[in-house]
Image (spheres, rainbow, N blue to C red):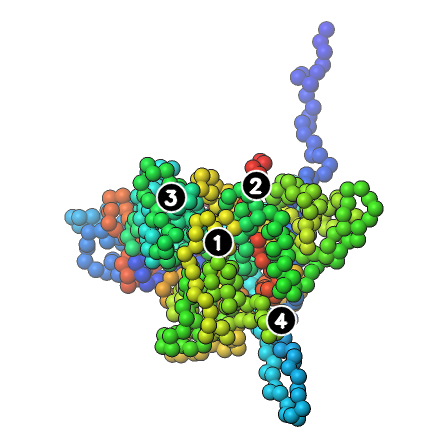
Amino acid sequence: MAEYSRLARGSFTSTGAAQVINLPFVPDYVDFFNYSKANSAATSQNVISGKWQYPMAQGSAVIEGYNATPALIYDTVTSGGISTFSAGQMLQYGPVYKHNSVASADFSITAANPAVVTTATAHGLKSGDVVIFEGLYQTATTGMAQMDGIPFTVTVTSTTQFSVPWDASGSNYTAFNSATSTGNIGAWKQVLYPYLYFPGTTFISAITAPNGTTIPNGSIQIDTTDAHNFVPGQEVAFRIPSQWGSVELNSLPNIPTPGSPIYGYVDSVTDYNTVIVRTPFAAAFTAFNANQTIASIPGLSYPQIVAVGDVNTGGVQISSGSALYPPPYFVPIGTTRFNTINGPAIQGAFVNNTSQGFIIGAGAGTVLTTADMVGASGNIIYWRAILHDMGLPF
Amino acid sequence: MTITNTSNLGPMILQSLAPAMLYVPTPTMNYITVADKVAMPANGGTTCRFMRPRALTPPTVQLGNSGIDPPAQIPQRDIIDAQMAFFGTGCIINEQVILQDQEGVLAWVSERLAVAMRQAEDLILRDYIVSAASQINAGGGSNGFNPTNLGLTDFSLVATTLDTNNAYKFMSGIEGMDRFGTGPIRSAYFMLSSTELQSDFDALVGQGVLNNWNYPTNASALPSEWGSVYNLRILTSSEAPVARNAAMNNLGVFNDVYYNTVLGKQALTHISQDGYSMNLIYRDPYYSGMLAQNATLAVKFAQSQALTQDTAIRNLLSTRLSNLGV
């Protein structure tokens, strides 16, 4: 090793989706091999290894895999390959997909629960990514502009389709038409680093009253538009503008003790965007209403659930096989936890989740068109990442 | 006749370094300015814990003449935790640069590292606020976007919200004076805004908005203070958070979304650990390799942050009324 270079190696079990590797540096060289596929019979479209080096394009790679014969060949990946990242600042976005700009950026959205987005070409997203919509107007007075500006976690159902957790089935929503000739407008783009700090403020998509079973009496169920990253014991406040209903849940005003905010706390976490919250107002509150009118949109504020503290003691329940001092984690989709690079903290504490490293994507080759770079679920992948002392040219 | 000129007898040395370095454009750092400062002790663990007692219910029901005491109240408290994080950056400088460069490279690199560290502190607080503080979309403007551009009612609404939440104001008011063009200034919260919105503020001057040069005295105005409106004093910075092209109106036109942070005292707390808030580290080339060729200059710091009064802070989101200059 030269004096200032950085070398790292590791392995992971593939989930079949793009894999993020956090490092204390941004590498300029990455390679990997799929031990599971190397250790099995030669099969068409199996990728055995791949590599990327700066200044190759981000998301590209050179891979080695089996063709139809099957014979081992080299191939290139142009998207969904290997990329590096430095996630240090908020409010960064991916490319804008604007309806009516070019045919390849066209898309439609169903007026349904959940709303389903269909894109004209591959959207390039994976489940757990976050997007925002803008200007979803069918005409000046119709469309789905109620969803503008809200960060939504996507659940990918195909390369050209994903859903977002929002009830767009109300009477004030008009399905967003994909036809480029109708003159409707609108755009979407990916939020690149949505969880650099957590827990924080999250938009509410639904509030469900207690039913005595899945939602115990004294609690309510809160669904959010992207990952809440709460843990049991998280203390939360509500900020719900009056047109959305459920204003009784708001932290203030407090009638019996004026000035004192009223908080609830998280009883249990169902998944990335659903929590059960114990609150003194669970018995009676007006229904939540996501069916806002288009006319109300300029100036429309959104209902939010806000982390304000936690009632945890710092102790973490230890069970067989669990880490003794686990770091804080975030849950971008489902119930899968991703640890931060931090050391141990009290669960529910405000934490910094900035990070850097590289991603092995789930892209396919130019020749091996149905290959999956990151392998199938359960495959063991070994990787190596390097930041060199010297690069020529720089 | 042959004239000797610089073509046939040119100067031996063609360049001369101007006597002073040029300034480095640096944004004002407003977020660290308004944050409460707390230091965790050494050996104090990874997490800073804050405690805030809850108010007890005022006993407004009379005792009567029964002689029986009312039920006791249970004192409660809220707990806020924040985990410490460490940051740092540095430069590796070959001794030939130090030996041959004429303008004291170690001195100005040290200065740049120090400024980079201070700016990192501010940017971390800025992004944390974007993530953690609840939002109100401006609706008082007329540009048709959501959020709209800032209107007078937006300033009033957010100050009213903080007042209703019993937030503490930062600044006391300034009494009016008998001076042309000035007006009294109310006691105020701070609004941390973008320099890009100054033209929008200018458009509201005369409608209750005062530039700091129209204060009766601007002795208490901060260097980055643009002016005042209602119960807000506006600090601007070019590094204020902006979501570029994050709003679109019904004509398909994009606009940027600005996070105008309005806050009272103790809303935001910056946490350091045992004097670890600034370390400038110079390491002589002696410590690098067998030929001792490279010196290093680096900074590192520990920082955490928390919203310690969530009811005393709001992000007032807005778009822009006028076109952005370049």
Three-letter amino acid code of the residue under disc 4: Pro
Indicate which disc, 3 or 4, sits on the residue closer to the N terminus.
3
* Residue linked to disc 1: A87
**Mark 4 chain:** A
Seen from the viewer's position, the closer of residues B244 and A2 is: B244
Kind of residue sitting beneath label 2: Leu
Determine whether, in the image, residue B113 is placed left or right of residue A316.
right
Q: How far apart are marks 3 and 1 (CA)?
A: 35 Å
SS under mark 2: loop
- Residue located at (50% from left, 53% from top): A300
At 82% from the left and 44% from the top, the residue drawn is: B179
Q: Distance between the residues labelled 3 and 4?
A: 45 Å
Type of residue at label 3?
Gln
Task: Tell me the chain of label 3.
Answer: A
Residue B259: give its label: none
Residue A138's label in the rendered image is 3
Percent x, y for residue B125?
Answer: 59, 57
**Foreground: A173 or A263?**
A173
Mark 4 or mark 1: name the one nearer the start of the chain: 1
